[in-house]
Structures are given as structure tokens and as C-alpha cells.
Image (tube, grey):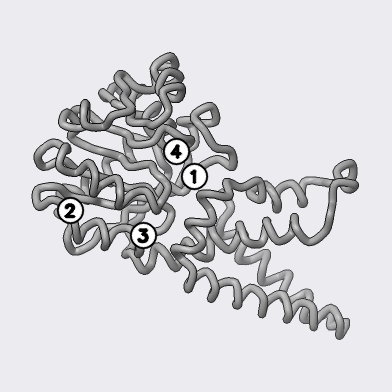
Amino acid sequence: MKTIGVIGLGVMGASFASRLSHKGYTVYGFERSQETLDIALQKQIIQKGTTEPKTLLKECDLIIIALYPTQILPWIRQYQQTCKDKAILMDISGVKSNIIKPVQAILREDLELISIHPMCGRESRGIQFSDETIFDQANYIVVPTDQNTPEAIELAKQLGVILGVKNISTLSIEEHDRMIGFLSQLTHVIAVSLMNTHENAHLVEYTGDSFHDLTRIAEINEDLWSELFLLNKEILLDETDQFIASIQHFRDVLDQEDAEEMKRLFIQSTKRRKLFNR
């Protein structure tokens, strides 16, 4: 892993590039925006950058693809013939089922795609919001398939160590997308729905930590997250239905003034939440 290419220098791509550069790796950036490349070079996030992938791709041993989900397959179709022989590709997409299998089906025989998902990020978009410290204390998931070699899987895990993540796990494609439907996508649905429940600008002067904590992720990248939701539609619908049932149960408890059941729900939620305390 001598030279690493990062495709897309948004929040995540630039954060990857910055951490890897500061760890001593040679990192090339590939980005449509020359302005973004200029910022990356000025801040020494990358050593070289280009708006035309064909000029530097052939030098990259590892290619980290930090594009929106629907852009990954078209990008690989267009540029895989330019990739270095036996290069390893890694996608960091937030959904896997509709990404990995289509890519592996058309991938050049000597190339290999191994999928990873660092569970971190920022609500804002653009290189100016990148921050390599997002990996510190983050969970990191490797999502291999039966088409992956042990060497590629190990490389994906080693990358997590280099990034400085807290915990490295392995999940199947199906396990990953079910997990992400609950832990990430449903939580965004809840935050967005809460912010859209009322016209709430007049409440700004009265909010406390609970409202801020619960709605932080409602400040959302609409282009990225609409793709993620639609690509994981069936799982997210199921998780949303289960949440609606849980809300309905709580409403019934409140309506019936069932204090004992309400306390039981509070005790159960407290017990479950403590498992997530860091």
C-alpha cells in the first residue's frame, strides 16, 4: 500500500486523505472541482491531485472511493481499465446491498473491491468541513463477500488501525444494511420528522441539551441521504414501521395513564442505553 488514491474529496474523502497523509502515506486526490483540489493541496491533505483520473490512477495501489452511492458503479465502469494491475478498491458507502454486488459483477478480473464503513461523519458537506479526528474512537465495519481474498480483508482491517478507529467489526452485506437501517437511517428519519413536526423558529430561545442532542443530525445533506434511504428502502420501511408501533404503544400508555407501564418503558430504555455509553 505505497500510494493511495482517494476518489472524491468531500467531508469523508478529505478526512481519509488527511489522516493517511499525516501517517506518512502518499495520497493522490481525484475530484471534479479544481477549487477543492487546490484547497487539498494547500492544506497538504494530498500530495497530488487531478480532475482527470486517468492521469494518476495507474500509480495507485489502493483506491478509496468516497463518492455518493449512485456514482460508484458508473465511476468504476468508466475508469477501471485505467487502474493499476491488481489494485484494491474500497468503497465507504453507507449502504452495501445495491453497491457491492453490481460492482463485483462487472469488475476487471485482476481488481478487487472490499467494502468498509467507518461509522463517523459530519452533517455539513465539502472539504472545508473535513476533519481527520472523526476516526478517533469511531466504530469501523468491514463488509466482505465470498469474492474477497483474505489479503484484501486484512488490508481493510489494517486501514482501520491506521485511521485510529476504536473498534473494528466484520458484517455481511445483509447484516450491515439491517444494522444501518436502525442505527443510522431510522435515527435520521426521527430527527428530520421531529424538526418538521412544527414550525419551530420561535422556540430557539428556549431549547436545552435534549433538543439539541436529538436533532443534531436533522441538519442533513439531502442529496446523499435521499440516495441512502432509497437504496435501503425495504429495510428502512420495516424499521420505520416498528418505530411507529413503539410510538403508538407509548401514546396508548399515556392516554390510559398507565404509570407502571410507562416506568417499565423508562427502565428498559435506560438499561439499553447504558450499553452504548462510551
Q: Are marks 3 and 4 in contact (CB under 8 Å)?
A: no
Q: As shown in the figure, which amino acid type bears the numbered disc 3?
A: Lys
Q: Is residue 117 left or right of residue 258?
A: left
Q: As shown in the figure, which amino acid type bears the numbered disc 2?
A: Leu
Tell me the distance, in whole angstroms, between the alpha carbons under discs 3 and 4.
17 Å
Q: Name above or below for residue 3 compared with residue 256.
A: above
Tell me the residue at 53%/49% (across/down): 223
Near-viewer residue (16 or 253): 16
Closest to the camera, between mark 2 and mark 3, is: 2
Closest to the camera, between mark 4 and mark 2, is: 2
Q: Are marks 4 and 2 in contact (CB under 8 Å)?
A: no
Where residue 36 is drawn, which disc sits there? none
Residue 21 percent across, percent down from the top left: 33, 23
Tell me the distance, in whole angstroms, between the alpha carbons under discs 4 and 1.
9 Å
Residue 116 percent across, percent down from the top left: 34, 50
Tell me the distance, in whole angstroms, between the alpha carbons under discs 4 and 2.
24 Å
Disc 2 crowd, CA 10 A, few/some/many (<14, 14-19, 20+): some
Q: Earlier in the sequence, mark 2 or mark 1?
A: 2
Closest to the camera, between mark 3 and mark 1, is: 3
Can you identify the residue that label 1 sits on? 120
Q: Earlier in the sequence, mark 3 or mark 4?
A: 4
Tell me the residue at 45%/19% (across/down): 39
Disc 3 crowd, CA 10 A, few/some/many (<14, 14-19, 20+): many
Q: As shown in the figure, which amino acid type bears the numbered disc 4?
A: Met
Can you identify the residue that label 4 sits on? 12
Secondary element at tag 2: loop
Near-viewer residue (23 or 126): 126
Can you identify the residue that label 2 sits on? 107
Near-viewer residue (270 or 193): 193
